Amino acid sequence: MPLVNMKDMLAHAYGHGYAVGAFDVVSLDFVEGVMTAAERSRAPVILSLAESRFEHYDFELLMSAVGAAARRSPVPVALHLDHGTNMESAVRAIRFGCNGVMVDTSHMTLGENLAATRAVVEMAHACGVPVEGELGYVPGVEGEDAERHPGPLAYTTVAEAKGFVERTGVDFLAVSIGTVHGRLKGKANLDFPRLRSINQALGIPLAIHGGTGLDDDQFRRLIAKGVAKINYYTALTDAAGAAICARVKSAPGAGYAALVRDVSAAISTEAERCMRVWGSAGRAAEVMSHCRPWGPVEHLILHNVVGISEKEAAVMIAEGQQVLGAIPGVREVVTGRAVKEGAQYRYCWLVRFAAPEVIDSYREHPAHVLFANQRFRPVAEGRISIDYALEGA
């Protein structure tokens, strides 16, 4: 069960005094490098896809790759949407396979952040997906990070953090205590007393954004004060860039494949170094035994139709695919007809849910209720339905 419940994974890290790396990936080289590091060091890992980097890749295509990498891996993996921009981003990420989401509304006023985050929590929890909130503001320091995270540093306060968690129900909280996105200039001045107080007040896994540039001692002190998830990206890109530059020098005129030959290995070396410093190395087996597996549920419906023509049935089915496919937690809606004439059931629906929790939220969702009562049930004869989990999924 390599794909595991992310809330269980971070609860184990929080309770046992280590941190799981959430490594932003932007290509197959990054996916392969991070997964090689996790498997070599026997560490749980989070493959993170940040919406702020979607310009570099097709989100749906890369999600297919990270999902495949997770399913075939012997170590526990979670898939996370990082810095989503809105509710629609979170719904889409869950549809494509993320089992953790973070919608970044930290730039808003506290009241706006509360309302937006609470709405995401209500939606995601109905899908069985945990949510990371962010309070305070972690800026970027140069280049693209400064453009994507403009403005000054705003520290997380203990009182606001306590109220925020209580009123939103987030599962994890990203806090601002002095880190920055991007390459750090000099040594970070981290507010460890503030972090300790936040941890004592909340008692939930904390996340740090902007892990690049911190030294080993700083990482260990962060973890000792409640940090169970560390976001990491810039140092991986630097390692990748250095590998390409070295190939340019050693093999002038080389083609693309030769230039990127060492990228995955360079990323893997840096990611594994982090896993060992953060204490996640060697934890895979105990995390696997602690975590619930993460896998979809298939909702199967078999039926015939009465009172309408086959053409009208096709219109109704097409409408259902569109309406039901938009419900949060629905990953896919597939329909079909019996191959042989005279089959006991003429039509079938296969609705894939992200997790078992979606069974109830889907059934009660207004869009499903309206379609089922007004369009489907009046013409669906002799229908049967069943929810099942695929063996080994």
Image (tube, helix red, strand yellow):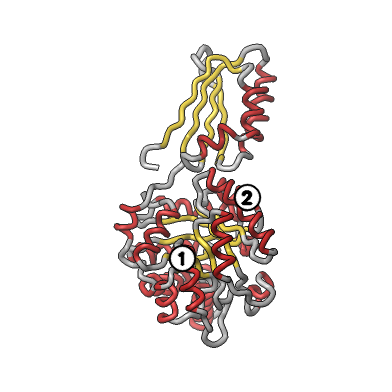
Which residue is at the front of the view, 166 or 184?
A: 166
Q: Position of residue 71 (x, y in %)?
A: 41, 50
Q: Which tag, 1 or 2, sits closer to the chain's start?
A: 2
Q: CA distance from mark 1 to mark 2?
A: 23 Å
Q: Residue at x 56, y 40 (%)?
A: 330
Residue displayed at 53% across by 18% down: 383
| Mark nearer the viewer, 1 or 2 | 2
Residue 229 numbered mark, or none: 1
Does residue 127 appear to the left or right of 379 in the view shown?
A: left
Q: Residue furthest bottom?
A: 186
Residue 119 numbered tag: 2
Name the amino acid, label 1. Answer: Lys
| Residue 300 place in picture, x, y as percent | 49, 28
Does the rendering let one see residue 211?
A: yes
* Disc 2 packing (10 Å; few <14; some 14–19; many ≥20): few
Q: Residue at x 65, y 20 (%)?
A: 313
Q: Secondary structure at mark 2?
A: helix
- Measured from the top left, where is residue 11 in percent x and y? 40, 58
> Relative to residue 366, is residue 328 depicted above or below?
below
Q: SS class of the residue under badge 1?
A: strand
Whether residue 251 is visible here, answered yes or no, is: no
Q: Quadrant of the C terminus?
A: top left
Kind of residue sitting beneath label 2: Ala
